Image: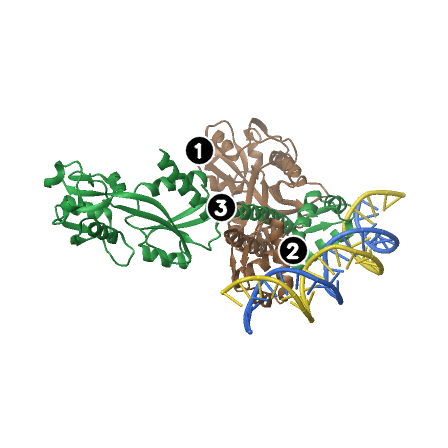
Chain colours: A brown, B green, C blue, D yellow
DNA sequence: TAAAAATACTCCATAGGTATTTTAT
DNA sequence: ATAAAATACCTATGGAGTATTTTTA
C-alpha cells in the first residue's frame, strides 16, 4: 500500500463518484477505479458498494476513511515537524552542569531559551566535568557547563563567565567586620571544599588560586559535593569556603559572604559541546547563551 | 511522498548503513540512496549526515523517524481496523426505540451485544415509529424498535415480541381484588394513553384491542409520551392504562398490574432496518436479537 | 437509454538493477 | 587501500491514458 491509495480513497469517499474524484485528482477515471480495487484487494475488504448509479462507503470503508484522513494529516505534520526540527524549534537538548556551575547564568539562559523555543524538551543533569565529557561522547547530552581546562579535540569550549570568588564565613568569624578579605588572611583557616578528582574541578581552581596568589595550600577539613552543603557546614562553623560569586543568590541566616581584595583571582566557567554536533537546537542554545553574556557585559 | 519513502527511511535509520538497509529491503543500494534523496528533497530537509564511513541521523531525521514509525504503525492499524469493521467488530450502531418499546428485551439485547462486540459504539435514541422511518432513511440510525404495521419496501421488518397487555390500576381501584380482568370490564373506565399520531403507534394497538375484543373505544382522559408518566398518573387516580407486560419491571407503590383474561389480545414489537444496509454490525446485532428471542422461547 | 463503473489495451514514467566513480578514513 | 555512498545509465514494472463494454436505475 502507498499513500497514493489513501489519497485516492479519501477523494472518492468525499465525492462518492469515481469520475468527479478522478477529475479532482487530475487523473482519468479508469486508473482510479483500478487503484481502489488494488487497495481493496490488498486489505481484503470492500471499501465501497458501487452500482452504476451510486457509490457508497461500506462500514469498513467508513472506519478506514477516518484512519486514512488521520494518516494523511500525520504525514503533513511529520513534514512540518522535520522542518521545525531543522530550524531547531523542535526536538530535545541535553544539558550537563557541574554542581559548582553558576546559580545565576544558567537559570537566566534556561528562561530565555524556554521563551524562544517552547517546544524543545530540556533534559538537565548534574555531572562533573569528566562525566560531561563521557555524556557528550555518547550523545546523552548536547552541551555541558564546566570549569576549564577541558582538552579534547572533539569538543568546542567557550568561556562564558569569569567570576570572582567570595569568602563564605560564619557570622561569628572575626573577619566579618572587613569589607574585603585578602587571600593571605585565609592561609591558616580550615576550608570546606569540593572533590578535586577527577580533574578539571572547581576545587582545583580554589587550590590554584591560593597557591598562585599567596603561596599557601588550603587545609581542607571537609569535602562535599553540593554548594548548599558547603554553606551549611560553614554556617555550622566547620570552616570557611571560597565560592563562586554567583552563589550570592543562596543567602542564608548565619552566613556572611565577603569579596576578595583586588586584584583577586577569578574562576572561569566554560560551555562545552561536540564540534561535530550539527544540531540546530544546540546552535540556538549557544546563541541564547551568547546573547545572555553580552546582555550582562553591557548591563 | 509515498509510504515507500517512509519504509526505506525507517530501515536506513535503523541500520545507519545504506548497503545493509538495502539488503533488508530486498533492493540494491543505489535506488535506496536515490529514494532517500528524493524524500529529503521533497521535505526540504537533510535527514541523514553521510560520509563514506558513517551515516547518522540529523536532529530533523530523529524527529521524522518518530513520526514515520507512528505513521507506518497507523497504516497497519487502519488495515486491521477495516478488517474488524468488515467483521462487524468495530464501528457504530444507531438504535431507535419507541417510548413504549420493551423495558425488558432491549436491555437484555444491549447487554448481550456489548458482551460480544465491546468495540462497537452504540447510539440509542428514543423515536416514535415515524421518526424511526426518517432516521433509517437518512442513515442516522441502523435499526429501530417499533409497533407494527410498518410498510415501506426499503425496510425489513421482523416481529420480535408478542406481549400480552397488563391493566395498570391504582391500588384503590375496585378491580384490584381480581386475579385477571376482561377488557369488557374496562369499557366505562377513564384511560391514560399515548399519542395515536403519527401511526403506527402503541395507542392504536390499545384502541384496536378494545374495539376488536369488546366493541368499545377507550375514553382517553390524558395523553402522555412516557410509560413512567402514565404510571404516575394511574397511581394518582386519573385513570387506568393498558400497558405492555414488560413494564412489570417498573413496579411502583400504589400501582397494581393485572393480566387480561385469556384469550387476550397482544401487542407486537418489531425490529426494523434497511433492506440495503450491508453493515455487518447490523447483521451481528440482528443475530444477537434473534438469539435472545430464541433463548426466551426455550427458557 | 443514459450515466457511470469496469474492462482491455497501450504507453511511458520511474522504481529498481548494474556498472562505475567519488570520497573519506 | 578500502569501504561505502553517489552517480550514470539501462531495464521493466505498473501507473495512467484511451477506447470500449457492462451494468442498472
In this view, the mark in front (2 or 3): 3
Q: Which secondary structure lies at badge 2? A: loop
In this view, the mark in front (1 or 2): 2
In this view, the residue in front, D8 or A98, is D8
User: x%, y% of residue B138?
Assistant: 41, 59
Between the residue at mark 3 and the residue at mark 1, the CA separation in whole angstroms equals 80 Å
Between the residue at mark 1 and the residue at mark 2, the CA separation in whole angstroms equals 72 Å
Residue B25 appearing in the image: yes
Q: Which mark is residue B88?
A: 3
- Chain ID for label 3? B
Answer yes or no: do the residues labelled 3 and 1 have beta carbons within 8 Å? no
User: x%, y% of residue B204?
Assistant: 25, 54
> Circle 1 is placed at which residue position?
A171
- Graded by Cα atoms within 10 Å as few (under 14), some (14 to 19) or many (20 or more), the crowding at tag 1 reads some
B159 vs A204, left or right, is left
A197 vs D12, left or right, is left
Name which residue lies at 49% across and 31% down.
A234
User: x%, y% of residue A286?
Assistant: 61, 51
B143 vs A96, left or right, is left
> Circle 2 is placed at which residue position?
B2
In this view, the mark in front (3 or 1): 3
The image quarter containing residue A198 is top right
Q: Are marks 3 and 1 on the same chain?
A: no
* Count of numbered circles on the image: 3
In this view, the residue in front, C24 or A80, is A80
Q: Is residue B103 above or below residue A229?
A: below
Between the residue at mark 2 and the residue at mark 3, the CA separation in whole angstroms equals 30 Å
- Chain ID for label 1? A
Q: Which secondary structure lies at badge 3? A: loop
Answer yes or no: do the residues labelled 2 and 3 have beta carbons within 8 Å? no
Amino acid at each position: 500500500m502507498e499513500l497514493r491509495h489513501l489519497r485516492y480513497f479519501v477523494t472518492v469517499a468525499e465525492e462518492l463518484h469515481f469520475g468527479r474524484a478522478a477529475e479532482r485528482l487530475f487523473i482519468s477515471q479508469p486508473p482510479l477505479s483500478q487503484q481502489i480495487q488494488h487497495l481493496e484487494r490488498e486489505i481484503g475488504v470492500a471499501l465501497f458498494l458501487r452500482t452504476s448509479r451510486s457509490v457508497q462507503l461500506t462500514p469498513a470503508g467508513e472506519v478506514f476513511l477516518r484512519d486514512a484522513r488521520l494518516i494523511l494529516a500525520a504525514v503533513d505534520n511529520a513534514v512540518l515537524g522535520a522542518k521545525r526540527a531543522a530550524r531547531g524549534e523542535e526536538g530535545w537538548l541535553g544539558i550537563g552542569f557541574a554542581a559548582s556551575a553558576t546559580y545565576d547564568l544558567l537559570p537566566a539562559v534556561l528562561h530565555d531559551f524556554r521563551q524562544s523555543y517552547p517546544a524543545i524538551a530540556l533534559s538537565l543533569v548534574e555531572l562533573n566535568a569528566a562525566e560531561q565529557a563521557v555524556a557528550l561522547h555518547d550523545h546523552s547530552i548536547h552541551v555541558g557547563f564546566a570549569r576549564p581546562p577541558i582538552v579534547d579535540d572533539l569538543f568546542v569550549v567557550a568561556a562564558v563567565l569569569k567570576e570572582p570568588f567570595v569568602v563564605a564565613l560564619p557570622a561569628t568569624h572575626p573577619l566579618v567586620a572587613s569589607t574585603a578579605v585578602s587571600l593571605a588572611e585565609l592561609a591558616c583557616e580550615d576550608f570546606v571544599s569540593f572533590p578535586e578528582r577527577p580533574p578539571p574541578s572547581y576545587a582545583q581552581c580554589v587550590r590554584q588560586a591560593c597557591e598562585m596568589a599567596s603561596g599557601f595550600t588550603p587545609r581542607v577539613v571537609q569535602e562535599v559535593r553540593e554548594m548548599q552543603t558547603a554553606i551549611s557546614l560553614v554556617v555550622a562553623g566547620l570552616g570557611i569556603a571560597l565560592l563562586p560569586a554567583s552563589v550570592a543568590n543562596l543567602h542564608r541566616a548565619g552566613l556572611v559572604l565577603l569579596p576578595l581584595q583586588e586584584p583577586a583571582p577569578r574562576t572561569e566557567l566554560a560551555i562545552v559541546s561536540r564540534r561535530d554536533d550539527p544540531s540546530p537546537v544546540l546552535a540556538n542554545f549557544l546563541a541564547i547563551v551568547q546573547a545572555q553574556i553580552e546582555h550582562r557585559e553591557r548591563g
